[in-house]
Amino acid sequence: MTPEQAYSDLVRRMKEIAVLGNTAGVLGWDQEVNMPAANAPYRGEQLSLLAGMCHQKFTDPQVGEWLTKAESFKVLMGDPLSDTAVNLREWRHSYDRSRKLPQRLVEEMASVTANAQVAWVEARRDNKFSHFLPWLEKIIPLTQEQAKCYGYLDHSYDALLEDYEPGLTTAKLNELFPPLKKSLSDMVAKITASKHQPDLSILQRPCDVGGQIAFCRKLAQAIGFDFDKGRIDVSAHPFTTGLGPNDTRITTRFEETNFENAFFSTLHESGHGIYDQNLPGNGHYGTPRASAVSLGIHESQSRLWENLVGRSLAFWKFFFPELKKSFPGVFDDVSLEAFYFAINHSAPSFIRTESDEVTYNLHVCLRFDIETALIGGSLKASEIPTAWNAAVKQYFGLVPPTDTVGCLQDVHWSHGSFGYFPTYTLGNLYSAQFFAAANKDLGGLEAGFEKGDFKPLKNWLTEKIHSQGQRYRANDLVKVATGSPLTSQPFLDYLGKKFGALYGF
Amino acid sequence: MTPEQAYSDLVRRMKEIAVLGNTAGVLGWDQEVNMPAANAPYRGEQLSLLAGMCHQKFTDPQVGEWLTKAESFKVLMGDPLSDTAVNLREWRHSYDRSRKLPQRLVEEMASVTANAQVAWVEARRDNKFSHFLPWLEKIIPLTQEQAKCYGYLDHSYDALLEDYEPGLTTAKLNELFPPLKKSLSDMVAKITASKHQPDLSILQRPCDVGGQIAFCRKLAQAIGFDFDKGRIDVSAHPFTTGLGPNDTRITTRFEETNFENAFFSTLHESGHGIYDQNLPGNGHYGTPRASAVSLGIHESQSRLWENLVGRSLAFWKFFFPELKKSFPGVFDDVSLEAFYFAINHSAPSFIRTESDEVTYNLHVCLRFDIETALIGGSLKASEIPTAWNAAVKQYFGLVPPTDTVGCLQDVHWSHGSFGYFPTYTLGNLYSAQFFAAANKDLGGLEAGFEKGDFKPLKNWLTEKIHSQGQRYRANDLVKVATGSPLTSQPFLDYLGKKFGALYGF
């Protein structure tokens, strides 16, 4: 077997795994969008069979042999950023990682989290943390064991971050988060104390759902989502899924008296979708060269279009007249400025997913503190509600009335997903840094938005980020694309300028 | 390995194949209903990978060993109609058959038909039989070779019928079809000559599509399609697909000026869907005990609800007032009798799928004659257009103006599906025989229809047919359910009575 043969065998195998993975993707999408609920157990069997097949095909020792042989490929010596080198680097990383967990641990985790998810749903519904606690008390030690198997240099939490944002460390987050937390808390105090407050009743004006659907399609299309290679549908929780090189699907949800939700979740999911639609083409499909970098980078694309573009005054200078036309009579007495202020309202709240640009990252910092303490062993699962409520009090001056709107609000821990939350904040920070760099490179982006022209920004993102696939790890990609490593400064500058103007500080 | 173990290993394997098969089903449904067209090549890769996996898992020699061992199971001696015996009988049949074709022939057929389908689409579009001919000239010898590999006693066409209607023979069709052809031709002549003709303009009255969708749901629900375990969607060609024990999906299509098409294709597909939804429950799912008997029996269920129920006067006694309410003003000047006559119009035509109850089977007889001649070797592929046009002239007194509406109208031959067409007529014959038996057993079915009550008929079908799965082969099922073997008499009696009354003969 030559290195070339080994490499081409690897590509074939990995593309086959991608084909199976996308098959599971279709089943998953269908389950959320179409499937009769009564079929759920059978669909579960299908997904589990496919997951097992993908795992088996990926962890096959043959893959290890191909990797070792292909790594002797002489082209690697030349350019570590060549397609071949990039693919081998990422496959090696995933392969080694996949073989570090003993089968027993994988199976135990799968079985515990399957039960934990059911328990979490009930605990949240009934506001009974005690019902979820026994499962957390199993999941946390299993997660700690996972971290030990994966290995880490500094903090065991590093081993978990690796699943979601390869290369990210606890140390880096400990450098980023505390000053961010401080600045955001100051901003929250100023906003809360401000005499200028928006008229939020605008956001509840009834807009018929048919009109919302049409308007959402218009928004998605305007910013660059390609409906010839994608769809938009309705599901209980909005999401984006890539089902093939020419099939990217986003979902949203509609309520007559909450157009804001539909519009901004459409822009958010479109941002994810545009990333997927502009990854390198068919020949690379199914390889790291044509895959997204990380959850944080993915989230940066959704947040950029949702917030930096979609909640800008320039964007609505173009779209507000369109909105008035689409919902005749509804916004006749509303000024552009009042509308813009309403969609940028900020206030302390309990629920992360409903929070605004200023408070969102405080919700994440809170979770990061609790997660690192849990995994590090300085906090017991039973102490979560107390720790949670104390943090909410400290950040927002509020006390959650129930655990349902407190420490039970997120599904992540029931999946055993520790280390996921920080990627949301990274996404926000990346988004501001990318936007600032694009604006510096191109100049006058907002003048374009006012005329409905989003192409220059979309093309910049495609060139700098989408088309790169996994050529760079996230921290390098940021440097290459923006000229400096990740900092929270562009994000804080952006927030300060925008919310300072709105709330008068 | 005990016979019990071998049997349970077989069940596990076959259920796994069903899970994969249904996964392909979801992909196929999605392709017709949702998928962006640009993703077609990738979806093709996915379907081909899954098909290969299913084939490999089924033809695995291990399956043969399990079968042989399980067949020594002593319970078999007791009851040949036990679940175990039925499953083993059908698995043995499929397994032996699947291993009779050499790999080379399977691959050649797959490759030739993939190209032939593309050529057929173009040939039909451009009315160029010569473009399709070279592919037919490859497909026919390959099909003859298949028949030889499968083996047969009497006519090589028997070996092909076995794929669609196990147990059916050319001899049986040669006994059924000629008198049927004669009677139907006589009826066509009387109908054509009749002074009574319906007002067909009724069928083109515009009915808004939203109203049609709602009405179709009402029709499907009324006859027993369970929307808690199924859906109805829109696709270019209506079809039914079972995606799991609690997930049966039907599709239809809507045109404002052709409500007839939507209503009757909904009833047709609902008939297929009701069969699937009432096969034996979850424990048996994925085994022959819980599978449909044959294409002919499946078609009997769709045609029964579409025609014997859905085009009956009793049915519209109930639904015509509902229709008037659903489309205010559209049918105010139309009498029930005029409406009933219009939806039962009969006239010679070129296209099988658009033909009526009287002429439909003549289209099938024509194809049967040509197919048996092609496979038997007495007709050359190049002679098809001449033979086709001569038969259309003979049956209908018409000459097809183009091959597009003649011998190029059906997709089946481009798939290599010789032996499929007769199952359409069998479906019609079975449907009338089942309906007559149900009416004899239950009495007064039509009185129920007039009140919107379809439960007794649906329950009879479920008891006699759906719940039986593959316990009986089709010819035995008919005997058990109706007390006599298949004949065309009930069908001819039904047509004669109905069309005699309408057209006055």
Image (spheres, coloured by chain):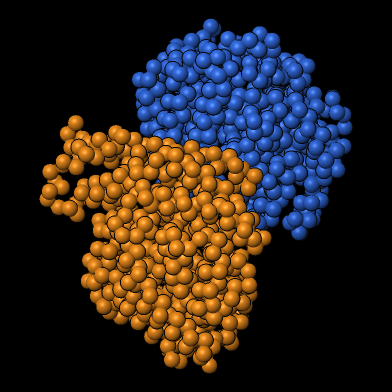
Chain colours: A orange, B blue
Q: Position of residue B112 (x, y in %)?
A: 37, 27
Q: Nearer the viewer, residue B229 or A211?
A: B229
Q: Where does the C terminus of chain A fall, quadrant-wise?
A: bottom left
Task: Please say whether residue B402 is visible from this viewpoint.
Answer: no
Question: Is residue B438 toward the left or the right of residue A125 in the image?
Answer: right
Q: Residue at x 26, y 78 (%)?
A: A440
Q: Residue furthest front?
A: A378
Q: Between A385 and B162, which is closer to the camera in this rendering?
A: A385
Does residue A497 appear to the left or right of B19 in the view shown?
left
Q: Residue at x 71, y 51 (%)?
A: B215
For residue A311, above or below residue A474: below
Q: Residue B125 location in percent, x, y?
A: 44, 40
Question: Which of the 4 image quadrants contains residue A310?
Answer: bottom left
Residue A438 is situated, as x and y percent measured from the top left of the image, at: 29, 73
Give percent across and percent down for residue B242.
Answer: 59, 37
Q: Nearer the viewer, residue A454 or A52?
A: A52
Q: Is residue A189 visible?
A: yes
Decide which of A40, B185 is in the foreground and name it: A40
Residue at x 30%, y 44% (from the top left corner) = A96
Quadrant assignment, res A447: bottom left
Residue in the image at 31% along x and 67% along y = A172
